[in-house]
Image (cartoon, rainbow, N blue to C red):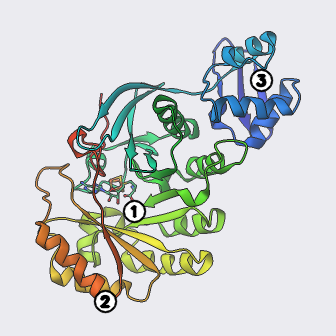
Amino acid sequence: MSVRYNKQGFTFSSSMEVELLVLTDLTYDELENFVKSQGLERYRADQIADWIYDKYVFNFKDMTNLSKQTRNELAKIAKIIDLSPVERKVSKLDGTTKYLWILEDGNTVESVYIVHPNRNTACLSTQVGCPVGCPFCATGQSGFIRNLKTSEIVGQLLFMEKLHGEKVNNVVLMGMGEPAFNVDNVFKVLEILTHPKLRNIGARRITVSTAGVPEFIEALGKKFPQVRLSVSLHAPNDEKRDILVPLNRKYPIALVIQALKRYIEDTGRRVTLEYVLISDLNDSPDDARELYNLLKGLKIHVNLIPLNPAVEGYKRPSHERVTGFARYLEARGVEVTIRIEKGQDIDGACGQLRMRR
Ligand code: SAH
Ligand code: SF4
């Protein structure tokens, strides 16, 4: 018996193949429809959601406010989650924890749980590998296999919260992969994470990072204006960006900036621009000047990320070079932070995530 959800609703087939419906793939409306399709009362959807998203119970057998028979019936056609932890590494430097998950097809992805003094952040992956192929990024260099399903993205968060025994206050889609190329699942994840009856995280506590796909930026602004947007720029002109972010050959800087302007107008939100500083490639005073000219007047915040060693041949600039770059922008009124990376000893910092087999 298998059950599938599509635009027409749930369809059941009695083939021998056992394909279980994964409940963390469902929006709230879909969960309600599923519950109704099982002949259960509507409020059962809230009970099940509470078990999953509040109590982190990932099997029906422990959902004690459902009858035994219901639990047995549900377990025959559905399950809660479809990834499992295979490895966990804790940073000795700062407590950052990196998880390696195995998916049902044997592929693996990583996520990171970052501990700050009074808040915790979950960094989630959206794809197995990444098709963009930025040369300094470990994920980009490991090739692209497939998009993650909604449940495989939501599952990373729920499992980390369960294992840590506490809820995170921030979620960033900044792990492996390019969210813009998995837009249907990413939008579904945002819907599930922000829904008051599901994970109920404030949209303002979620950040999506993209290498810069104008249509995606526009769609995100329209659909989730409260979700925070980060754009990975990394270079001040097309010549350099064509190499550092190969997607630039399709969507050059001018198009990205135009999309940002529109996004800022539509949403009124400040956007973060990520700029990885790489020794001798994009860290000179000239680069800073060109970057300033590109950004002046925009409601943005520049996040400078001194490169984390991930791929041979790409080096982090000296401390002086990094602060010099930051000061140039600051002196001209640009809001700048230098990101202090966490989890470097466990390769859990930005750009250090990769697939493993
Ligand atoms: N694909 C999306 C989201 C995932 S990458 C994007 O690129 O925005 C998250 C961030 O890590 C990006 O800003 C990315 O450029 C940065 N990053 C990648 N490799 C890095 C490295 N070696 N050192 C520091 N940051 C890196
Ligand atoms: Fe993909 Fe982002 Fe890495 Fe570039 S930096 S390869 S877009 S994950």
Judging from the image, what secondary structure is the residue with disc 2 in? loop
Instruction: Point out the tag, 3 or 1, that comes first from the N-terminus.
Output: 3
Q: Pinpoint residue 258: horizontal percent, then vertical percent.
A: 48, 80
Quadrant including the C terminus: top left
Is 341 located above or below residue 253 in the figure? above
Q: Pinpoint residue 75: horizontal percent, then vertical percent.
A: 69, 16
Instruction: Point out the tag, 1 or 2, that comes first from the N-terminus.
Output: 1
Q: Is mark 1 within 8 Å of ligand 2?
A: yes
Judging from the image, what secondary structure is the residue with disc 1 in? loop
Q: Which residue, given by chain and number where applicable, does mark 2 sit on?
A: 332
* Ligand 2 - quadrant of the structure image: bottom left
Q: Which residue, given by chain and number where applicable, does mark 3 sit on?
A: 12
In 3D space, how far apart are the residues under numbered discs 1 and 2 (Cα atoms)?
Answer: 25 Å
* Kind of residue indicated by mark 3: Phe
Q: Pinpoint residue 296: horizontal percent, then vertical percent.
A: 38, 88
Q: Pinpoint residue 295: horizontal percent, then vertical percent.
A: 37, 83
Q: Which residue, given by chain and number where applicable, does mark 1 sit on?
A: 211
Is 217 located above or below residue 39 in the figure? below
In 3D space, how far apart are the residues under numbered discs 2 and 3 (Cα atoms)?
Answer: 62 Å
Query: How many callouts does the rendering have?
Result: 3
Question: Quick one: label 1, few (<14), some, or many (20+) residues within 10 Å?
Answer: many
Q: Residue at x 85, y 33 (%)?
A: 43
